[in-house]
Image (spheres, rainbow, N blue to C red):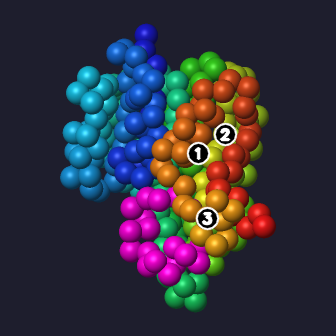
Amino acid sequence: MGKVTVITGGTSGIGRGIAERILKDSGAEDRIFVTYGHDQKKAEEFLNDLPGEKRSQVILMKADMSSYEEMLKFVAKLKAQTDHIDWLVSNAGVSTYEKYENYTFEEWTSIVNTNLSVPVFMIQELRPMLVKGGSVLFTGSYAGQQAYSSSLVYGVTKAAIHFLTKSLVKEFEPKGITVNAIAPGFIETPWHQARTQESYDRINKKIALHRFGTVEEVADMAFAVLSNGYMNGSVVDIHGGYDYY
């Protein structure tokens, strides 16, 4: 019986990097279910960029993770295709650069739903499918450890994810399932494509390594956490030494 991994938001950025890293060490019998929200073209690019022998191991699934109802539809489709999950990676997330004074209740609610509320209930739904000794990994953020000025709502949801990580440890204890999170700092992803050089320079001055991290560095960390059977209830920072000096 091959290993089954489920990763939400896995066709771009950090999610894609984690999916590719898991596939790199996967066996022919292993399968990975990868969700995407709306960008069919980006999902197909992810699949086509994979080595030929790995493509058959990937099952792409469209799932709007801002919607509780759409999440339930995704779960139903997933249950029809597999009877167990070894690794569950909750990665889908959104943000906004809108200033706090301009927030609307609808925008706040949409981001909280996507980053926190829907993942909570997705994991509740998938909990019975997780095998003994399995692993749950959340993509948190260093913005949930230290307040950034760029997005209040994003930081609040990620802080909640970090606390959720620790809180779920007891819930999954009976089956020996580990629950951890990674907390990346500034990582070079498509989110930053519109950033000016001045913005890069200003942020890099605050990072001891004076550069943004790479998706591959975060993916390696995620894979190490998923593979470590004794790491449990941890939130692992990976930020290059942000504000450490």
Nearest the eye: 224 or 172: 224
- Residue drawn at x 52%, y 78% as measured from the top left: 199
Q: In the image, is 13 to the left or to the right of 39?
A: right
Residue 99 in which image quadrant: bottom right
Q: Residues within 10 Å of mark 2 (few under 14, many from 20)?
A: many
Task: Name the quadrant of the N terminus.
Answer: top left
First in sequence, mark 1 or 2: give its number: 1
Q: Name the residue under label 3.
A: 210
**Is mark 2 in CB contact (under 8 Å) with mark 3?**
no
According to the image, label 1 marks what residue?
Answer: 138
Q: Earlier in the sequence, mark 2 or mark 3?
A: 2
Q: Which residue is drawn at 29% across and 56% down?
A: 38
Please identify the residue farthest to the top as the structure is shown.
1
Marks 1 and 2, how far apart at CA: 6 Å
Q: Residue 180 carries which label?
A: 2
Instruction: Residue 79: tell me if it is visible.
Output: no
Q: Do tag 1 and tag 2 residues touch (Cβ < 8 Å)?
A: yes
In this rendering, the answer to whether 81 lies above or below 171 is: above
Give SS at disc 1: strand
Q: Is residue 46 above or below residue 26?
A: below
- Note whether residue 61 is visible: yes
